[in-house]
Amino acid sequence: MTPLPNSRINRRDVLKSGAIAGGTLIAGCFDTTTNDDASPDEREFPEPQYGDPDREYHLRATESEVMVATDDPYNGWTYNGEYPGPEIRAVEGERVRVTVENDLPEETTIHWHGMVLDGDNAMDGVPGVTQAAIEPGEEFVYEFDAEPAGTHWYHSHVGLQLDRELLGPLIIEERDPHIEYDTDETLILDEYLPTEPRVDTSSGNGGGMGGMGGMGGGGFPDAPPAEGTLINGRLPEEPATIDVEEGDQIRLRLINAAAAATYEIGIDDHELTVTHTDGPAVEPVPVDTLEIGPGERYDVVVEARSPGTWPIRIWPVDESTSAGRALLDYDQSDGDGTEGTIGSRQLQLSDLNAIDSLDAYSGEPDRTIDLTLSGGMMGGDGDEWTIDGQAYPDTDPISIKEDEHVRFRMVNRSPVRHPMHLHGHHFAVGNALKDTVIVPGHMGEITIDFVAENPGAWFFHCHHLYHMETGMAREVPYEQ
Ligand SMILES: [Cu+2]
């Protein structure tokens, strides 16, 4: 099934008109797991497979009050009334079952970000692609193998729900870690947005679109301005505290759950030794700071060798939003805050070297796909973010075949970062294995390589929620 030129199916128009498009045209665009004659509503989804789970969890998506600082509650949407949502934790290789109950006023799904879901495409949580969304009052049972190990997370994959606090940590413990540590703590980084999330086309906030010819003047879809930065759901006035003892090695699991912000993180007077990215292990590399984009995860080990109460600082890159803060609080400390300095060694992608072999990704690929990341002003309606000029859902699929070595060569013709995420696979980028990677703005180029070894219909998209929502996404189906 080669994509047919000039035969893009406008699914939005199909929906609008209520018409069912002709079978042959649809067959050219949708993958083989779907019904050839189906409108999106009638599409067939992969069949869920259930086994004998080792762990069971229950998540209820519900409207609830969120408290990020004393006396400052707002109405958000949460899992089980908690923000961040309850931790789901399992050991590598276990089978995990999560029953999701939808108590929201609209439909929802959950995506298990970082799980490759080998053979479990039906559990990927992409509405209209891998399942029909869960209607209000209904539930869906997800089940998956805890693979690969590492720091992952789960979140809603419907509309802008991620930015209403529908997210939580998903931690898969390694059976045989390549590093030693005494304790592990998860830090979830997020924007403080106490209002209903809406696509902002007013200002081009968050990246300075004005610098690009023809793209100034506002109107580019972006996130609404955040009112602060949260670490584990706390504003800096009442920060989350990590208790440590002198001499401990603390593994910090960093998850950027923000809808839009890329953050830089550093700890006063402490070094960060980077040990994992997006789950997979890397050769330990000491730095002072690192940048983490939406959807990305980094694990770092911090040696507690400087007693006191130190700020863990998170500051948004390229945005005027105020910084977030947590505390590293030593046992013997009197609790008074101490301030120090943060060095200038910033982690680079080229510093990352995967522990696992990258042999499968070496050599010439079987299929190379060039993808241009851009915005609608370059040729579309002006209110879209695009991949090769197309805005989802009015897009051709990127079809691949089982067992192929596939290469995506991305170039970013916009001035802002795009954290690109591929579902169902980890990919090699440089010498690392990741599932989300920032493509820098201003003609930044990133090449990823992956092996097509997990048949299904997968999603590939920018993890800036407002870029995804306004078009920067594609389906990646396996041809038969
Ligand atoms: Cu983007």
Image (cartoon, grey):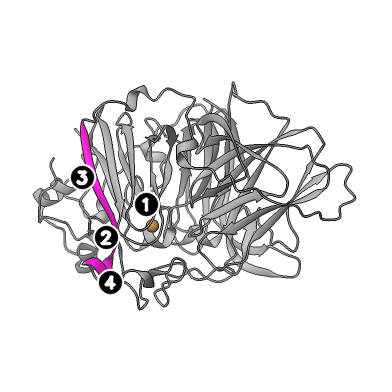
Check disc 4 and report its element: helix, strand or loop.
Answer: loop
Q: What is the spatial separation of the Cα atoms under label 4 and label 2, in whole angstroms? A: 11 Å
Circle 1 is placed at which residue position? 127
Q: Would you say 342 lies left or right of 199 here?
A: right
Amino acid type at circle 4 is Gly
The residue wearing badge 3 is 35
415 horizontally vs 75: left or right: left
Residue 382's tag is 4
In the picture, residue 77 is in which quadrant? bottom right
Give the quadrant of the N terminus.
top left
Which sits in the foreground, 381 or 269? 269
Instruction: State the image coordinates of residue 250 (x, y, percent, origin top left).
Output: 71, 36
- Ligand 1 image-quadrant field: bottom left
Which residue is label 2 attached to?
391
The residue stretch that appears in magenta: 366-378
Mark in front: 2 vs 1 = 2
Residue type, numbered disc 3: Asn
Assign the magenta stretch its main secondary structure.
strand
Image location (x, y in percent) of residue 209: 38, 69
| Sequence-first disc among 2 and 1 | 1
Q: CA distance from mark 3 to mark 1?
A: 16 Å
Disc 4/disc 3 C-alpha distance (Å): 33 Å
**Contact (Cβ within 8 Å) of mark 1 with mark 4:** no
**Disc 1 or 4, which lies upstream in sequence?**
1
Could you tell me which residue is drawn at 71 percent across and 43 percent down? 270
